[in-house]
Image: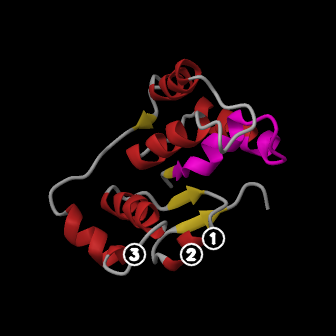
Amino acid sequence: MSQTVDANMLVYAVNEDADEHGPALALLERLGQGPEIVYLFWPAIMGFLRIATHPGILPNPLSITDAVQTIGDLLRRPHVRTPGESPGFWELYLDTGGARARANDVPDAHLAGLMRQHGVGLIHTRDRGFRRFTGIEIRDPLA
């Protein structure tokens, strides 16, 4: 089954101050080795860059250079894919839950819509909000 990660898993993996750091890092190391296809969707990547470099969120934020390098290291792996929105995405987004999404739910609906569009069935996340999207398996590697 193809899989992806939410921005929170990426952030925990680099945030050594977080209790979630060890399990998140182990997950990313496992996924990074392959050979299973891993999808990194742009909303999760951009969310990671926003959070991991923000001094108001993390006690020891990454420099933009380190954050970009972290993502670049993942993207260079041959089994990692970064597809974006294809024709018909808007309708799929609305059907996935985007028609009801507001505020912080919008990025989740965006990511869930991309998952559905590209046939990705599993997301590793701590965000319980993904349970509202049908057809997506949620796995919390820290639970």
* Residue 21 quadrant: top right
Q: Does the magenta stretch include residue 10?
A: yes
Q: Position of residue 83 (x, y in %)?
A: 32, 43
Q: Is residue 6 left or right of residue 43?
A: right
How far apart in space, not on screen, are marks 2 and 3 (Cα)? 14 Å
Front-most of residues 115 and 6: 6
* Residue 76 quadrant: top left
Within 10 Å of disc 2 (Cα), the crowding (few <14, some 14-19, many 20+) is few
Q: Is residue 39 visible?
A: no
- Vertical order, 96 against 49 (above or below): below
Tag 3, which secondary structure? loop
Q: Do the residues labelled 2 and 3 touch (CB within 8 Å)?
A: no
Which residue is tagged 3? 101
Q: Is residue 126 visible?
A: yes
How far apart in space, not on screen, are marks 1 and 3 (Cα)? 15 Å
Which residue is tagged 2? 131
Tag 2, which secondary structure? helix
- Vertical order, 44 against 133 (above or below): above
Q: Which colour scheme is used?
A: secondary structure
Q: Which mark is residue 128?
A: 1
Q: Position of residue 54 (x, y in %)?
A: 59, 38
Q: Which amino acid does label 3 sit on?
A: Ala
Q: Do the residues labelled 2 and 1 touch (CB within 8 Å)?
A: yes
Q: In this view, does 84 lie to the left or right of 26?
A: left
Q: Are marks 1 and 3 in contact (CB under 8 Å)?
A: no
